[in-house]
Amino acid sequence: LPVLLAQSFAKNFGLYGERCGTLSVVCGDADQKDRILSQLKCIIRPMYSSPPKHGSSIVRTVLSDEKLTSQYYKECATMADRILDMRTKLVTKLSEVGSKHDWSHVTGQIGMFAFTGMSKEMCDQLTNEYEIYLTKDGRIS
């Protein structure tokens, strides 16, 4: 079976709406590669005829330059540390105000979004009473 890996650079590089990313395919043999490529071309062509180039140019510029790549990774680490710090402060504050719920899953997650574990009803209450917006499945950024 072939392996397909889709990777987006939209969030990582702040390139929202630029359709910037890759699709990598590992095939078992040349014949499989030709068949998959043929199908991908059929799928891709109607989606766009002249895709934007500047998003991918930005990514290529950053990742092709050692100094810019280093700066990029340092800035990513700074943001990741800030997100973890904010999550820790949130969990601490929830405990301070009397929540008995186990919120350790919030600090145990990584990435820009966290699943709170809250029900749809709890999410609706946060939105309706406190103007805190999150998806109905409890995901928050």
Image: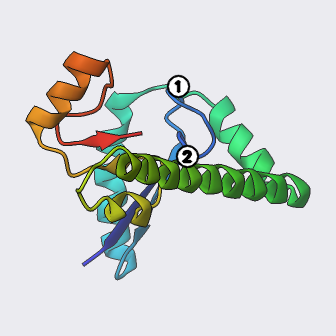
Q: Residue furthest bottom?
A: 28
Q: Tag on residue 9?
A: 2
Q: Quadrant of residue 53?
A: top right
Q: Position of residue 116 (x, y in %)?
A: 28, 49
Q: Which quarter shows the N terminus? A: bottom left
Which residue shows up at 55% across the image and 46% down it? 9
Neighbour tally class for label 2: few under 14, some 14-19, many 20 plus, Cα within 10 Å:
some
Q: Amino acid at mark 2?
A: Phe
Q: Does dot 2 land on a helix, a strand or a loop? A: loop
Q: Which quarter shows the C terminus? A: top left
The reply, left or right, for residue 40 in relation to residue 76 is left
Looking at the image, which is closer to me, 23 or 102? 102
Q: Amino acid at mark 1?
A: Ser
Q: Quadrant of residue 129?
A: top left
The reply, left or right, for residue 79 in relation to residue 91 is right
Distance Cα–Cα, label 1 vs label 2: 19 Å
Which residue shows up at 31% across the image and 58% down it? 103
Q: Does dot 1 land on a helix, a strand or a loop? A: loop
Which residue shows up at 34% across the image and 82% down it? 28
Tally of numbered tags: 2
N-term-proximal mark, 1 vs 2: 2
Looking at the image, which is closer to me, 93 or 57? 93
Q: Position of residue 26 (x, y in %)?
A: 41, 74
Residue at mark 1: 50
Q: Position of residue 42 (x, y in %)?
A: 30, 42
